Amino acid sequence: MAAGTVQKDHFMMRMLVLALLLAAFPAHAQPDLGPFTARQLAPGIHLLATPPSYRGPVIGNVTIVEQASGVVVIATAATRDGIRGPAADGIGFRADERSDTIALNQLSGFLSGVRAASRNPAHDDATRARYAGMIRDIEGRMADVRGTYLVLPTETFARALLLDDPERPVRLMFLGRANTAGDAIAWLPRQRVVVTGDVVVAPTPFGFFSYPRDWIGVLERLKALDFALLVPGHGEPQADAAYLDRLIATIADIRAQMAALAGQGLTLEEVRARTDFSAQTALFGDTPRNRPQFEGFWLTPMAENAYEEARGEPIVRGGGS
């Protein structure tokens, strides 16, 4: 097994171990993956994802590719450098009480806010049920948080790396900066499956500390792979490029509107007040639940990124994405 870069909380440690177990257990004896559910995307290719009913803290998809030599987890050099920097966000490189306390305090604050919001007497039964599910899933995450720590990769790549295999070769690629400065793409040419990480997130994209201009180019390169199945970092697998086209269009619109005003000496707040992203909101924030997520996870950070980009200012990554 080649070494890689993952945040080694209990969930991820279990995922790496269970990756080796999935093929060994018959379907009726699969181990408990909670909160994930497992499915096979193609022979030897598995997806662990949270079900639609999951309401807890965001957890990304885990794609497992069986190869003759085992399971491989590898990162770009830029990702390794990011883990060493502010993205660690208080989590250390070994299990200790300090890291546990930081993580538990963050989750506890989140849980307190959800509990307070759940007590609104105006909620209907469906809303109360959603809050109850959210509280249950946050509590489950808190019970599993101890032991969280970061592991730096022992092997990285710069532009491309082939992990050869008789049945399921994987080509790891860096196609450019997008959601981060080190987004790794996994391409399985025989199966025509591409695993994008957070370069693609659905149904609400994430825009924190991203690189709008470069991101468009990465999405165009993904389309050129002519994939049969795209596995995003969050959300359901996709069988065509329609969502990529939507992402390209929304990034281009944000860049165009922000660039037209950013050079006039206006502040970010003044520029943002003069932009109109209602068409984008209608596409991505099409439900009462999706609308605030789209504003908070995408429009607000992407407007800031595009503003900094237009003014030639550096986009400084932190612990937010």
Image (tube, grey):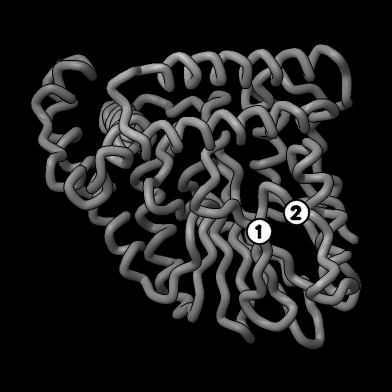
Would you identify the image quadrant in which residue 257 lies? top left
In 3D space, how far apart are the residues under numbered discs 2 and 1 (Cα atoms)?
6 Å
The front one of 78 and 47 is 47
What SS does tag 2 mark?
loop
Q: Is residue 177 above or below residue 99?
A: below
Which image quarter: residue 94?
top right
The structure residue drawn at horizontal position 67% and vertical position 71%, both measured from the top left corner, is 171
Residues at discs 2 and 1 in contact (Cβ within 8 Å): yes
Please name the residue that numbered disc 2 is placed on: 33
Q: Give the x, y percent position of residue 172.
A: 66, 64
Residue 156 rendering spot, x and y as whole percentages = 76, 51
Q: Which mark is residue 37?
A: 1
Quick one: 238 or 27, which is closer to the camera? 27
Left or right of 162, for residue 201: left
User: Which amino acid is tagged 1?
Assistant: Thr
Disc 1 element: strand
Please tell me whether residue 311 is drawn above or below residue 105 in the rendered image: below
The answer to whether 223 appears left or right of 320 in the picture is: left
Q: Residue at x 80, y 22 (%)?
A: 92
The residue lying at 60 percent from left, 43 percent from top is 59
**Viewer-nearest residue: 30 or 8:** 30
- Quadrant including the N terminus: bottom right
Q: Quadrant of residue 263?
A: top left
Mark 2: few/some/many CA within 10 Å (<14, 14-19, 20+)? some
Name the residue type under label 2. Leu
